[in-house]
Image (cartoon, rainbow, N blue to C red):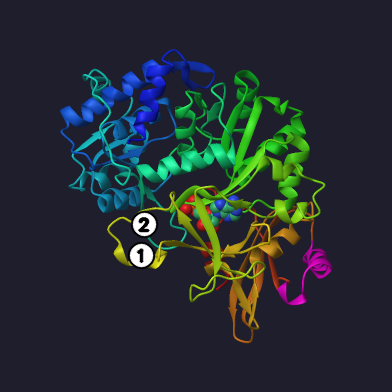
């Protein structure tokens, strides 16, 4: 079955339901959306004669056309390669070449910066801007029926964010995407047809994955007019449209919470903030719950098992009287329903609860492998288990607490130090807005702990005293660097590799 059939079904059963909003403005109902998508598919299949399985990339900012193109690609039986619109043209060129993309949908403004680089890529037979005459002509093509796809067929080639090395193409099948969607209903948030999902984060990543659950029940899809994230705009949309949910990185959640706290905006129009993609610190989620109420669910996933490794439910977040509530809200929750989770030693043996090792996941949402990269696939998928590269431990109730990426663990004087633990302590000081802890090579200790801090009016001595009060002496940073901002990639993840370069 093809993921585009979710849209086809909703258009048949609920043709008149509101489908797509641009800001507060209704753009199309389900009948209209499916019609445009079927025409884009007709254009790709009949006019361009693309064969099932060929790759079509999107290099577009969030917009109503994004959904048309994305679902048009699947409707025609092709493979979507959504590329983050903030990538450098060189990075785009790498993806186009690596995935052997046959057709590219790209915003004019983005193309203007990358035209020369892309002109040389032989595999790209056609480039179409969504507001161009070509695109309008595509929408006049005769619509086609949804192409049949088997569950094992490739649907989404997802390029990893590449915080280290070259990005790899994660092969996600239709089955993977259905499994992730099923988990959304059972483990994250049951979707109601009255709901609205707002794409405030790039649709090429986590936010786009959440379109499926909302297509399935014919709920509303909202593209902010700004095309991205703006806390005040989101609050206004929530007030007007009601039952608004979104996927948000922890930094985005923090900004909305701060906005609501300062402006006194009414958060009741928000249904659910699904947060994940990076660590959410205890102080931040506590404040979020205090300010916004019980509107949060956490997910932990990675491109290789998108959005679907564990979830920390609304109920668990709300259970303040539970004796281990604080530990639980610091965790990423329990395995989602179609995935098994274990913690393993380097030799692959499973570790007991409480022990720390690499997080493994197995199940329906785990990728088929890396695109044309058998070595990387063999390294990540062993005996059916995905080795996530994340380090963590499970407690007796199945809650997983992530420590760090394995490569970020600092080994000082033979002891493992997990930066996350030190970061949690430093953030207890209200003057500290952001922090990232890394290791610096050291002749005596192997590595020493160094903290990069975004803060005003706080001294290293105060931070050191805070650490002394909460963690073992050897975990304390030996150096503090006060910076205006932390380097982040296009998904808002802190680039520890860049921080290490500053001190090595
Ligand atoms: P990506 O494949 O770019 O989505 O990055 C996935 C990585 O982000 C994971 O392997 C984790 O290291 C991190 N990550 C994802 N979700 C969470 C979470 N809820 N808490 C902490 N880290 C997370």
Q: Which quarter of the figure is the C terminus placed in?
A: bottom right
Distance from disc 1 to disc 2, alpha carbons, whole Å, reads 9 Å
State yes or no: residue 320 in magenta. no
Q: Write down the quadrant of residue 111 in the picture.
A: top left
State yes or no: residue 467 in magenta. yes
SS for tag 1?
helix
Residue 427 percent coordinates (x, y): 74, 56
- Asked whether residue 469 appears in the rendered view, the answer is yes
Position of 472 with respect to 441 (left or right) is right
CB at disc 2 and ligand 1 closer than 8 Å:
no
Identify the residue shown where x is 67% and y is 68%.
354
Looking at the image, in which quadrant does ligand 1 appear?
Answer: bottom right
Q: Name the residue under label 2.
A: 168
- Asked whether residue 82 appears in the rendered view, the answer is no
Q: Which of marks 1 and 2 is nearer the N terminus?
A: 2
CB at disc 1 and ligand 1 closer than 8 Å:
no
Q: What stretch is highlighted in magenta?
A: 459-475
Residue 163 percent coordinates (x, y): 47, 58
Counting other residues with Cα less than 10 Å from the Cα at mark 2, is it few (<14), some (14-19), or many (20 or more)?
A: many
Counting other residues with Cα less than 10 Å from the Cα at mark 1, is it few (<14), some (14-19), or many (20 or more)?
A: few
User: Contact, CB < 8 Å: mark 1 with mark 2?
Assistant: yes
Identify the main secondary structure in magenta. helix
Residue situated in front as seen by the camera: 413 or 388:
388
SS for tag 2?
loop
Residue situated in front as seen by the camera: 25 or 382:
382
């Amino acid at each position: 079955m093809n993921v585009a059939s979710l849209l086809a079904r909703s258009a048949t059963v609920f043709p008149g339901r509101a489908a797509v909003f641009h800001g507060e403005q209704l753009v199309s109902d389900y009948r209209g959306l499916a019609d445009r998508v079927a025409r884009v598919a007709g254009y790709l299949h009949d006019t361009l004669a693309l064969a099932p399985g060929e790759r079509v990339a999107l290099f577009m900012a969030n917009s109503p056309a994004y959904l048309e193109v994305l679902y048009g690609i699947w409707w025609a039986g092709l493979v979507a390669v959504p590329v983050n619109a903030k990538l450098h043209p060189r990075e785009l060129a790498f993806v186009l070449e690596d995935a052997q993309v046959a057709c590219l949908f790209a915003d004019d403004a983005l193309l203007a910066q990358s035209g020369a680089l892309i002109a040389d890529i032989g595999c790209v037979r056609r480039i179409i801007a969504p507001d161009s005459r070509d695109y309008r002509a595509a929408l006049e093509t005769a619509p086609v029926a949804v192409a049949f796809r088997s569950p094992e067929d490739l649907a989404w080639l997802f390029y990893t964010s590449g915080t280290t090395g070259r990005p790899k193409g994660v092969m996600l099948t239709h089955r993977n995407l259905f499994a992730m969607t099923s988990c959304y209903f059972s483990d994250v948030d049951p979707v109601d047809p009255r709901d609205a999902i707002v794409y405030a984060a790039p649709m090429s990543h986590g936010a786009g994955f959440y379109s499926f659950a909302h297509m399935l029940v014919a709920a509303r899809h909202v593209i902010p007019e700004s095309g991205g994230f703006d806390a005040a705009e989101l609050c206004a949309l929530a007030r007007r449209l009601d039952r608004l949910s979104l996927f948000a990185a922890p930094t985005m959640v923090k900004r909305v919470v701060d906005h609501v706290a300062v402006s006194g905006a009414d958060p009741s129009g928000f249904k659910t903030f699904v947060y994940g993609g990076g660590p959410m610190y205890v102080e931040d989620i506590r404040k979020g719950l205090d300010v916004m109420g019980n509107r949060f669910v956490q997910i932990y996933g990675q491109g290789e098992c998108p959005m679907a490794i564990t979830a920390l439910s609304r109920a668990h977040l709300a259970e303040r009287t539970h004796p281990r509530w604080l530990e639980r809200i610091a965790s990423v929750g329990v395995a989602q329903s179609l995935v098994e989770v274990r913690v393993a030693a380097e030799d692959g043996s499973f570790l007991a609860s409480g022990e720390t090792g690499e997080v493994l996941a197995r199940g329906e949402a785990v990728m088929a492998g890396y695109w044309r990269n058998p070595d990387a696939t063999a390294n990540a998928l062993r005996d059916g288990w995905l080795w996530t590269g994340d380090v963590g431990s499970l407690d007796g109730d199945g809650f997983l607490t992530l420590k760090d990426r394995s490569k970020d663990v600092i080994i000082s004087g033979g002891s493992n130090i997990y930066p996350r633990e030190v970061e949690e302590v430093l953030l207890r000081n209200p003057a500290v807005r952001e922090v990232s802890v890394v290791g610096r090579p050291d002749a005596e200790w192997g590595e020493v702990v160094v903290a990069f801090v975004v803060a005003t009016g706080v001294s290293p001595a105060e931070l050191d005293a805070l650490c002394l009060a909460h963690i073992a002496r050897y975990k304390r940073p030996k150096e503090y660097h006060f910076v205006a901002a932390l380097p982040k990639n296009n998904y808002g993840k802190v680039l520890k590799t860049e921080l290490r370069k500053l001190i090595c």
